[in-house]
Image: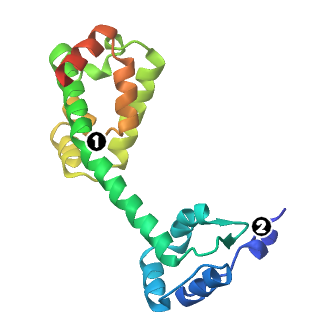
């Protein structure tokens, strides 16, 4: 199928009011059209449509389902997600801190660069590559500072701040077993 065929199948853009009408035509109860259009002006229709899935089948909403039901589910999910993040953030920061502390004090400021300090050479190489990608992508002031002041040499306590939680998990998994045990004791 060529690109023109796809272009012909892509839906045309709609106004917020048209989006409300589409929802109404699919059996969604909309008590306040202006309020629904205002919500859609703040929350992309496509994002909100993910919350609509449990309220419909075959593009038709179940009897009695209202726009407020969908919006309330979205708001509940947002509050729940923020609550979970607020609970997990201190744990992640402590995890990040203790990995950096352990590596720095056991192997030196740039000991993370030495593969001998880790279990798996391939994972270690991937970690270094990810760090480099994050350094190149970052516009953080502390990254620019280390590039100019230290010739781009980054101690573990700096690069660890660029790591995603997924990368942190991989770093921990690649620590030697005795280092994992020691790191776990910090967190308990």
Point out the frontmost of discs 2 and 1. 1
Few, some or many residues within 10 Å of mark 1 (<14, 14–19, 20+): few
Residue at point 32%, 16% (across, down): 114
> x%, y% of residue 10?
71, 73
Q: Nearer the viewer, residue 6 or 28?
A: 28
Few, some or many residues within 10 Å of mark 2 (<14, 14–19, 20+): few
Residue at point 19%, 44% (across, down): 148
Q: CA distance from mark 2 to mark 1?
A: 44 Å
Residue with the most extreme top position: 178
The colour scheme of the drawn protein is rainbow
Is label 1 in a helix, a strand or a loop?
Answer: helix
Is label 2 in a helix, a strand or a loop?
Answer: helix
**Label 1 belongs to which residue?**
88
Residue at point 25%, 44% (across, down): 87
Q: Nearer the viewer, residue 177 or 38?
A: 38
> x%, y% of residue 151?
22, 37
Left/right of residue 103 with respect to residue 177 in the rendered view: left
**Label 2 belongs to which residue?**
3
> x%, y% of residue 47?
51, 66
> x%, y% of residue 105?
15, 18
Contact (Cβ within 8 Å) of mark 2 with mark 1: no
């Amino acid at each position: 199928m060529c690109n023109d065929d796809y272009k012909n199948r892509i839906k045309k853009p709609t106004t917020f009011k048209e989006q409300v009408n589409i929802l109404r035509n699919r059996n969604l109860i909309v008590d306040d059209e202006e309020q629904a259009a205002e919500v859609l002006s703040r929350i992309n229709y496509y994002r909100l449509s993910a919350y609509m899935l449990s309220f419909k089948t075959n593009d038709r909403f179940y009897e009695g389902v209202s726009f407020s039901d969908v919006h309330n589910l979205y708001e509940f999910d947002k509050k729940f997600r923020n609550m979970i993040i607020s609970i997990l953030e201190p744990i992640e920061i402590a995890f990040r801190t203790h990995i950096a502390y352990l590596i720095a004090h056991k192997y030196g400021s740039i000991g993370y660069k030495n593969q001998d300090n880790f279990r798996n050479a391939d994972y270690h190489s991937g970690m270094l590559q990810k760090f480099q990608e994050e350094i190149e992508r970052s516009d953080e002031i502390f990254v620019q500072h280390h590039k100019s002041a230290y010739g781009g040499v980054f101690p573990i306590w700096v690069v660890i701040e660029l790591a995603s939680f997924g990368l942190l998990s991989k770093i921990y998994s690649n620590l030697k077993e005795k280092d994992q045990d020691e790191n776990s004791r910090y967190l308990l």
